[in-house]
């Protein structure tokens, strides 16, 4: 069996609702390269042979279903399951087990909703099948593993431990971390306890290891980005537009810019670095936009300079205003001659008058 026909996509949790990028829209639905972020992962799963996806969420299921419906537009059959209380990653997986039609030994893809990756899903299934593992994990290598749980493997790729975040240099025994995509043997899902929160990383995987189960790691050093921060989200969108992060769902050709239908861009405006301009947005004369996402209906007035930033739906950026590494929420109005930098977030609907904030000196 070299294909997983079914997948569970995890898009819930406690923090997700509290950390929306543009307030009105939960993160998985914020457009990245022109379409809600989740679309990229769903399209990649489809391209790898997945037919049926169960979307496991603990909040706001009502925003997913109206957009993705039964999944047929993506060639998928999508079902939605909402937890009453967040069940954790393992609990969420167990909670949707009854929706799966796969046989006991068949592979089921499970993936985190907040990761953008070029993982070769079929290679992970092939590794899983060839090794006879109970669960196989996509592992990625990071330069600084201190912020992550570590997953060392032996010479054959078999996982030997799940280690909490290292606190001393001696504890950094590997640079491999859990990249948030797994193949479960279907029957293993049924062994997760029902009806209470369970963490796969802290409970399920260590428990399986302790009981002698075979957990296989596959290091795939392809594109991988955790979209946990607004900055990372903007980076991910730009990388999708540039084609660095591969996705069949990018609505257009990859390159320096992606301008969606009905957007208008002044002839001398300059869009580079994977900038996306959403439907109905307007970019004024002489504006320079690099590596940024300008969402639907936003207006960038002449001479504004936007870099590595997100401008929310219907927001307006005044003339000559500089926005660098910042997020401007939906419907906010930033007047002319402002300077927003350094991770600043302007809340949805906020109005900033002309020349209200700046970073550089007054000279
Ligand atoms: P635990 O392993 O359960 O402790 O979660 P975590 O906090 O380590 O997970 P993380 O925040 O890394 O989330 C991984 C993915 O699982 C993300 O896509 C989350 O949206 C999703 N997720 C986390 N917790 C839950 C949950 O309680 N329910 C559901 N449906 N998804 C979750």
Image: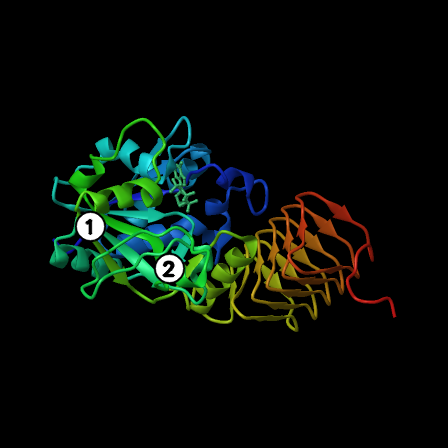
Q: Secondary structure at mark 2?
A: strand
Rendered position, 11 above or below 41: above
User: Between residues 186 and 161, which one lies in front from this camera angle?
Assistant: 161
How many badges with numbers are in the image?
2
User: Between residues 80 and 230, which one lies in front from this camera angle?
Assistant: 230
Q: Secondary structure at mark 1?
A: loop
Q: Quadrant of residue 263?
A: bottom right
Q: Position of residue 305 (x, y in %)?
A: 69, 66
Which residue bears the numbered disc 2? 117
Q: Position of residue 28 (x, y in %)?
A: 46, 46
Residue at the (61%, 60%) spot, across then down: 309
Q: Position of residue 74 (x, y in %)?
A: 32, 49
Rendered position, 191 above or below 113: above
* N-terminal-most mark, 2 or 1: 1
Q: Position of residue 47 (x, y in %)?
A: 27, 57
Q: Quadrant of residue 70?
A: top left
Quarter that holds the C terminus: bottom right
Residue at the (34%, 67%) spot, across then down: 221
Circle 2 residues within 10 Å: few <14, some 14–19, many ≥20: many
Which residue bears the numbered disc 1? 4
Ligand 1 position by quadrant: top left
Q: Quadrant of residue 121?
A: bottom left
User: Between residues 346 and 214, which one lies in front from this camera angle?
Assistant: 214
Q: Is mark 2 within 8 Å of ligand 1?
A: no
């Amino acid at each position: 069996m070299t294909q997983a026909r079914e997948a569970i996509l995890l898009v819930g949790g406690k923090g997700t609702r509290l950390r929306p990028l543009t307030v009105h829209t939960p993160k998985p639905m914020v457009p990245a390269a022109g379409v809600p972020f989740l679309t990229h992962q769903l399209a990649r799963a489809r391209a790898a042979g997945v037919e049926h996806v169960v979307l496991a969420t603990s909040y706001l299921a009502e925003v997913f279903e109206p957009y993705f419906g039964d999944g047929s537009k993506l060639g998928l059959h999508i079902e939605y399951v909402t937890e009453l209380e967040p069940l954790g990653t393992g609990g969420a997986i167990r909670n949707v087990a009854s929706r799966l039609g796969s046989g006991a030994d068949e592979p089921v893809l499970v993936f985190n909703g907040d990761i953008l990756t070029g993982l070769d899903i079929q290679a992970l299934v092939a590794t899983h099948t060839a090794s006879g593992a109970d669960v196989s994990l996509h592992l990625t290598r990071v330069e600084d593993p201190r912020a992550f749980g570590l997953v060392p493997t032996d010479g054959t790729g078999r996982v030997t431990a799940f280690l909490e975040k290292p606190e001393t240099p001696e504890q950094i025994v590997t640079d491999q971390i859990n990249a948030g995509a797994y193949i479960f043997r279907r029957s293993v899902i049924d062994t997760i306890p029902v009806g209470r929160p369970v963490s796969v990383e802290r409970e399920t995987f260590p428990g399986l290891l302790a009981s002698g189960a075979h957990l296989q790691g596959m290091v795939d050093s392809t594109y991988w980005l955790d979209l946990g921060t607004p900055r990372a989200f903007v980076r991910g969108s730009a990388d999708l537009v540039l084609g660095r992060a591969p996705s069949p769902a990018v609505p257009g050709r990859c390159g320096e810019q992606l301008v969606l239908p009905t957007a208008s861009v002044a002839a001398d405006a300059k869009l580079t670095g994977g900038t996306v301009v959403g439907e109905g947005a307007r970019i004024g004369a002489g504006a320079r936009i690099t590596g940024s996402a300008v969402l639907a209906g936003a207006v960038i007035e002449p001479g504004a300079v936007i870099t590595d930033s997100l401008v929310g739906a219907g927001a307006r950026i005044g003339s000559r205003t500089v926005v660098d590494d910042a997020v401007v929420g939906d419907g906010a109005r930033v007047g002319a001659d402002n300077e927003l930098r350094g991770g600043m977030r302007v809340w949805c609907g906020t109005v900033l008058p002309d020349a209200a904030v700046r970073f550089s000196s007054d000279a």
